[in-house]
C-alpha cells in the first residue's frame, strides 16, 4: 500500500466491506488473520516495518482474505495523518514496542 492510497480507502477493498480497521505493529499478523477469519465484512490495514512479519502474515491468508487486507510496510505515522476522518472504525495496537528505537530515529 502506498501513502497516497490512504486518501481513497473505499476503492481499495471489495464492495461488501462495511468497516475498515487499522492495526499498527501487527508483528507476525496472527491477530489480523484471526479477525479476518471471524468477521467477513471487515477489511484491515496493517502497518508493520518488520519484513519477516509481513511475509508471515501473507503466508497465513487465503485468497479471499488477501482482498481484505492492505499492508503498509513501514512506520504507521506516515499514513495515519493521511486517513480521512471517520474512515477507520477500529484501531488496534497490541503489545506496543516502539520502532525505530530512540537512538535510530532520524526523519520521522
Ligand atoms: C512487541 S511487537 C507486538 C507485535 C504484535 N502486535 C503482537 O501482539 O504480537 C511490536 C510491533 O510493533 C511494531 N511497531 C513499532 N512501532 C511501529 C510503528 N511506528 N509503525 C508500525 N509498526 C510499529 C514493531 O515492528 C513490532 O513488530
Image (cartoon, rainbow, N blue to C red):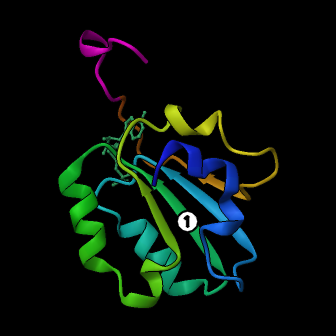
Picture layout, residue 35 above or below residue 90: below
**Magenta part, dominant SS:** loop
Name the side, left or right, on which 36 lies relative to 55: right
Picture layout, residue 9 above or below residue 15: above
Cβ of mark 1 under 8 Å from ligand 1: the answer is no
Q: Looking at the picture, tell me which residue is in the foreground, 72 or 39.
A: 72
Name the side, left or right, on which 17 lies relative to 52: right
The quadrant in which the N terminus is found is bottom left
Picture layout, residue 54 above or below residue 78: below
Secondary structure of the residue carrying numbered label 1: strand
Q: Looking at the picture, tell me which residue is in the foreground, 103 or 73.
A: 73
Q: Position of residue 83 (x, y in %)?
A: 68, 44
Specify whether residue 107 is painted magenta: yes
Residue depicted at x 68% and y 56%: 8
The quadrant in which the C terminus is found is top left
Residue that extends furthest to the left in the rendered view of this protein: 52
The answer to which quarter of the image holds residue 22 is bottom right
Residue depicted at x 17% and y 55%: 52
Q: Position of residue 95 (x, y in %)?
A: 41, 45
Picture layout, residue 19 above or below residue 98: below
How many circles with numbers are drawn on the protein? 1
Q: Which residues are magenta?
A: 99-108
Q: Position of residue 36 (x, y in %)?
A: 51, 79
Residue depicted at x 60% and y 38%: 80
How many residues crowd around disc 1 within 10 Å: few (fewer than 14), some, or many (20 or more)?
Answer: many
Q: Position of residue 40 (x, y in %)?
A: 61, 87
The answer to which quarter of the image holds residue 55 is bottom left
Residue position marked by numbered label 1 in the rendering: 44
Amino acid at each position: 500500500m502506498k501513502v497516497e492510497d490512504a486518501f481513497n480507502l473505499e476503492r481499495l477493498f471489495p464492495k461488501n466491506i462495511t468497516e475498515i480497521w487499522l492495526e499498527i505493529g501487527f508483528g507476525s499478523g496472527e491477530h489480523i488473520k484471526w479477525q479476518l477469519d471471524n468477521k467477513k465484512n471487515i477489511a484491515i490495514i496493517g502497518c508493520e516495518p518488520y519484513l519477516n512479519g509481513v511475509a508471515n502474515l501473507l503466508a497465513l491468508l487465503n485468497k479471499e482474505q488477501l482482498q481484505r487486507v492492505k499492508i503498509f510496510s513501514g512506520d504507521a505515522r506516515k499514513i495515519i495523518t493521511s486517513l480521512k476522518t471517520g474512515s477507520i472504525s477500529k484501531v488496534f495496537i497490541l503489545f506496543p514496542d516502539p520502532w525505530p528505537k530512540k537512538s535510530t530515529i532520524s526523519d520521522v
